[in-house]
Image (cartoon, rainbow, N blue to C red):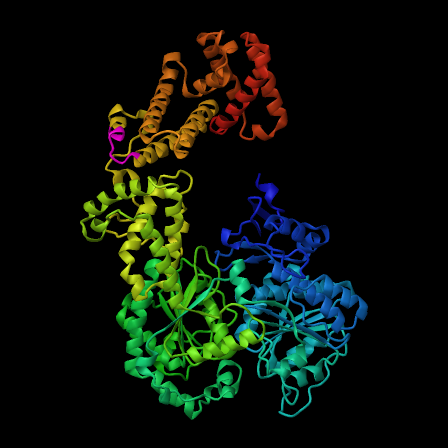
Amino acid sequence: MPALFAANAVLLASDGVQARIGSLGAGKEWFKPWRTITGREDALPHQSELQVMLEGVFERQRFLNLLRNFIVFEDSAAGGGKLVKKMAGYHQFHAVNAAIEETLRAAQWVTADRVADSAARYQLDHRSGGEPGDRRVGVIWHTQGSGKSLTMAFYAGRVILHPVMANPTIVVLTDRNDLDDQLFGTFARCRDLLRQPPVQATDRADLRAKLAVASGGVVFTTIQKFFPEARGDRHPVLSERRNIVVIADEAHRSQYDFIDGFARHMRDALPHASFVGFTGTPIEKTDANTRAVFGDYISVYDIQRAVFDGATVPIYYESRLAKLQLKESERPKIDPEFEEATEGEEVDRKEKLKSKWAQLEAVVGSENRIKLIARDMVEHFETRISSMEGKAMVVVMSRRIAVELYRELIALRPTWHGDGDDQGTLKVVMTGSASDPLDWQLHIRNKKRREMLAERFREARDPFRIAIVRDMWLTGFDAPSLHTLYVDKPMRGHGLMQAIARVNRVFKDKPGGLVVDYLGLTDELKQALATYTEAGGKGQTAVDQAEAVALMLEKYEVCRGLFHGFDWGKWLTGTAPERLSVLPGAQEHILAQEDGKNRLLRAVTELSQAFALAVPHEEALRIRDDVGFFQAVRAVLAKSMVGERKTNEELEHAIRQIISRAVTSDGVIDIFAAAGLKKPDISILSDEFLAEVRGMPQRNLAVELLQKLLRGEIKNRAMRNVVQGRSFADLLEASLRRYQNRAIETAKVIEELIQLAKDMRAANARGEALKLSEDELAFYDALEVNDSAVKVLGEPTLAGIARELVATVKKNVSIDWAVRENVRAQLRVIVKRILRKYGYPPDKQERATQTVLEQAELLSEGWAA
């Protein structure tokens, strides 16, 4: 009943060895492992995942903690506004619990002895544990895409509810307006967790008013609002309270200094507050300021762990065009302070371009280069989406380049343009004013219109597929179906890592994201990786696309091996009928091998995923037709497996079939058409069709065809006739088991299946001979159950019982009778009374009554309607 699931907190799925946990309504990609029991270290390799999950999640205290503090409901923009249930992963759960212990230590609410014990009890990668009362909680480094914003909300919720904190005030800090809005949106959707609605400070005066309170409150602000009116001034004290916690997003920017920066002004304003930092990228070793403000790491969840857990997908890197257009002599070094300034939306200096930046912008944004990149991008992206549905983002140096690139792309693909915000495939996302050039005005939108575009871009099915940005949407913006990032802007360090992480979000069958570099950022990527590994991170920030190509070729050889000795040349060169004619032989070749079908299904799926990552590399394009052939064979074999066909939605997303449209218009190949047979209706299965199947040269394929037909018919019968459905299903399984175990030759199993089909056809005729309707025959079978003691009653008596049962049950049935015990009990009495009346053997009555009630349950919904 739906009502039973309304309060469902968590769902666990396991086969006894593997185990996954998720929330009600989540897609399969969001069911994740739980890697630790205590949170101190990972579970040992020999421990089963089910054991780890049962002990790690369902131990009483942990489970109550999870229920109370780590489940939220959000309105999903991408899901059309529907409510989405989200539950913390193990990395979020243990990071927050460790951070709470460190918060109590930093605010000096507990003794040093208890803190030491608490820290040992929790953390997975614990390196903090500063002095009691030092106000430095620590830093949580969880790689981008692993749910950092929600982790911050879970932490805030726990701090607020902790009795020792005595109704604290939470201050959430960002350094950009758009980040402030995005994070505020996450917290606002989690207001039940916070027990209060969060608020945003509009300016310095509003911030001071919101912090000058006796207790409580969740206040969002940008760093800049903590700076005094004049440089060099001291910030006034806003509160002396100890139960204030400052949560900083991306806690390692240039503003964290003690001379005239954030650290000094924040401490002047809130002298006894505690500070916790959250970041998606590691702190550089030389960054002493950040450690002085926040302390060291209390939890690390790096790229390797996130990809291993399926929390993110791997990022691949491809370099294009850089060498053609930009010589190193034309690529001046831009001083880091200026590059940082251009990232901050509120920094006044961002528009005052220095001569070096202007020089580089002129080279990068030259007319010829923009035309070249536009042509390459159109070709590249269209090839990408031929194998993997999804979206792309283009990052450029300046608003001028954004507008001119848009103009060139639209000239090449006019249908990508749309006049309204709700139309079009391509959009520029940028800020601006009425003083900007006239041809820029089309792209300048206010905050509300930009948010509408953001919602369109997050929605996977929306035709808005390509966004051109300068610095918007590069941090804190999630669009899971985004799989390609074109970078044509100088970036470095955490800014570069944050940008490339836009494509690492999990989305259905998406195998990975691709970063396409038009500027030659290899050195910057290496430096970012060096910083990452120095900080203890594992895994690569981005993998060279050559590795994706190597993986694809490896999987390609596996598929070729399965077809060793089979010639599929006509698939590559023949007409549509000739291409179809290749498929029966190909299926026969696979089915003749031991476990051939399952091996092929698995191998082609892996090849398709690797192919989607490698496109449009020339090696991928070289083998495209062969991949199409493998996928076509997979499609027909998968169609022969009743109940295993993917939904249309699954087929639409991520890995798209590359089967040539010359074969079929919709990419789905009919197994009967491929075998050269007309699809029959098994209920009137003709001897001619069975003879045709018996005479097929492809014996294994004939077995597959008959198996598919019989399974489908048995499934239909089981929905009307309990006994027939069971008996025919048992007979089919017995035949197929002997066939799969090679205990019976192919010709013999074909004869058995043909006989089974004839028996099923004969079963249809029994009702006519007995003068029983289909419903009455179903009850007749339920009574007969092949028992000799029952058969002595004779067909006329059993038929009479069946007719009376149908008439009586129909009178007494209601839609929900099966779950109303009083109705069920009443029917049981009626059935037994009828059986006694006709002299049905007493010792068989209980079994017959149970079968009759099962049969009535199957048919009741139709009757009640």
What range of the chain is rendered magenta?
A: 692-699
Along the viewing direction, whichever of 353 and 202 lies nearer the viewer: 353
Where's residue 223, x and y in %?
Answer: 61, 80
Where's residue 834, x and y in %?
Answer: 55, 12
Q: Is residue 413 visible?
A: yes
| Residue drawn 62% across the image and 81% down it | 225
| Residue drawn 57% across the image and 18% down it | 847
Along the viewing direction, whichever of 811 and 656 lies nearer the viewer: 656
Q: Is residue 611 visible?
A: no
Where's residue 427, x and y in %?
Answer: 38, 70
Quarter of the rendering occupied by the N terminus:
top right
With respect to residue 857, does 52 lie above or below? Answer: below
Q: Is residue 524 left or right of residue 86?
A: left
* 694 part of magenta stretch: yes
Q: Is residue 849 left or right of residue 620?
A: right
* 843 part of magenta stretch: no
With respect to residue 3, does 552 lie above or below? Answer: below
Residue 742 figure quarter: top left
Looking at the rendered structure, the number of numbered marks drawn on it comes to 0
Along the viewing direction, whichever of 567 and 293 lies nearer the viewer: 567
With respect to residue 474, does 846 lie above or below? Answer: above
| Residue drawn 22% across the image and 47% down it | 579
